[in-house]
Amino acid sequence: MIDHARTPGEKIRISGGGRCNFTNLYASAENYISANPHFCKSALARYTQWDFISLVDRHGIDWHEKTLGQLFCDASAKQIVAMLVSELRAAGADLWLQTSVSGVTRSPEGFVVKLEREGKPVTISARNLVLATGGKSIPKMGATGLAYDLARQFGLPVTDTRPGLVPFTFAEDRFRPLAGLAVPARLSNARASFDEALLFTHRGLSGPSVLQLSSYWQEGEEIRVHLLPELDLFAALRAQRQDSGRKDLTTELARHLPARLVDALAQDWSLQGRLADQSDAALQQLCERLHNWPLKPTGTEGYRTAEVTLGGIDTDALSSRSMEAQSVPGLYAIGEAVDVTGWLGGYNFQWAWASGHAAGTAIRG
């Protein structure tokens, strides 16, 4: 196994706030984005979240469910890295760190890989070659497009790639005064809708609902924000009008939303007056604005902060059972390098484990 990093599994180490959201209890094909939504079904069915949980349990790693089926280590993501390295050693494999690939060619026996290891050129031969280098997300962690370059070299098509699970940006730091505020929200567009927290940042919007929707967003498209989706806000404000009608509308609205957000909306939407002065029609109009707030991002923060890369090696070029290239025997592609991208919440790790297992099983025969 070749890795150009100083230590193994750096993206695993930093994931989940350092505790690694290593899988999801509800992982299924419906949680993945791909030009071929059926491609991931075979691998996911043959190595499930329960299989990986069993592996974690065998290594004595304590874990917990945080929310929405997301599983995290109780202690540290480093435990998952150590587990994987232990499994690698047990399989009789070698791990070469700080080793870069300078070239790959075909040979009658399989592949010849030219490397730079400890400042010296090294050439190795292999019957099988697995592209497991991920995508372009978080380049400061060493991410590159190597898998795509090698795939194209061997004639495999690569779909367009773009950042996924990434914060939105807006012109003129629109939300900078609200940075740090989090609210329950439903983010949606024509193709998807997610109910989770929304976080205002110096550059725009982040938080789980935003990251999820970003994978379904297209440049120049408008999104819709539904604040407080689990609250019947109209009923709540009508009740408050009976009990606290003399108070300002904004004061009473701030019982449900952060005061800074209410102040900003009050300026943008000219909200003023006592709650008692608001008719049912006025309250309904306000609630509609809060439940259907149109926003148009100027873009995203890009690969710099994206958790995943959308797109990748075209699944039409691979076997869904073995992950082997149809036209290049012995060449395999797994994980994020392939055009299969999971939702936020442990789904991408599960795809990595499942696709890796599929390729490994096929190579072992």
Image (cartoon, rainbow, N blue to C red):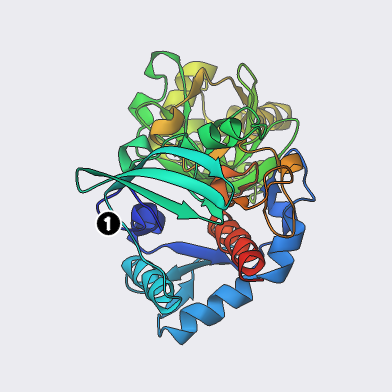
What residue is shown with label 1? Answer: 7
Q: Tag 1's secondary structure? A: loop
From the top left corner, tell me how far across and down residue 49 is, in percent: 61, 70
Q: Is 29 positioned to the left or the right of 186 in the image?
A: right
The quadrant in which the C terminus is found is: bottom right
Q: Residue at x 39, y 13 (%)?
A: 172
Q: Amino acid at mark 1?
A: Thr
Query: As drawn, which residue projects farthest toward the front?
Result: 108
Write down the quadrant of residue 294 in the picture.
Answer: top right
Characterize the local packing of mark 1: few (<14), some (14-19) or many (20 or more) Cα atoms within 10 angstroms.
few
Q: In the depicted view, which residue is nearer to us: 179 or 150?
A: 150
Q: Residue at x 80, y 50 (%)?
A: 38
Q: Is residue 362 left or right of residue 249?
A: right
Question: Eyeballing the image, is 257 above or below 16?
Answer: above
Q: In the displayed structure, does residue 130 sit left or right of residue 94?
A: right
Hey, which quadrant is residue 222 in on the image?
A: top right
Can residue 343 be seen? Answer: yes
| Pick the front one: 306 or 316 | 316
Image quadrant assignment for residue 242 = top right
- Please determine whether, in this image, residue 65 is positioned above or below residue 197: below
Q: Is residue 193 left or right of residue 351?
A: right
Residue 111 in picture, x, y percent from top left: 52, 48
Residue that protrudes farthest toward the left in the picture: 119
- In the displayed structure, 354 sits above or below 326; it is below
**Residue 270 seen in this snapshot:** no
Count of numbered labels shown in the rendering: 1
Q: Which quarter of the image is occupied by the N terminus?
A: bottom left
| Residue 236 in the image, given as x and y percentages of width and height | 62, 47
Residue 30 image offset from top left, x and y in percent: 74, 53
Say which residue appears at 43% left-offset and 45% top-offset. Answer: 113
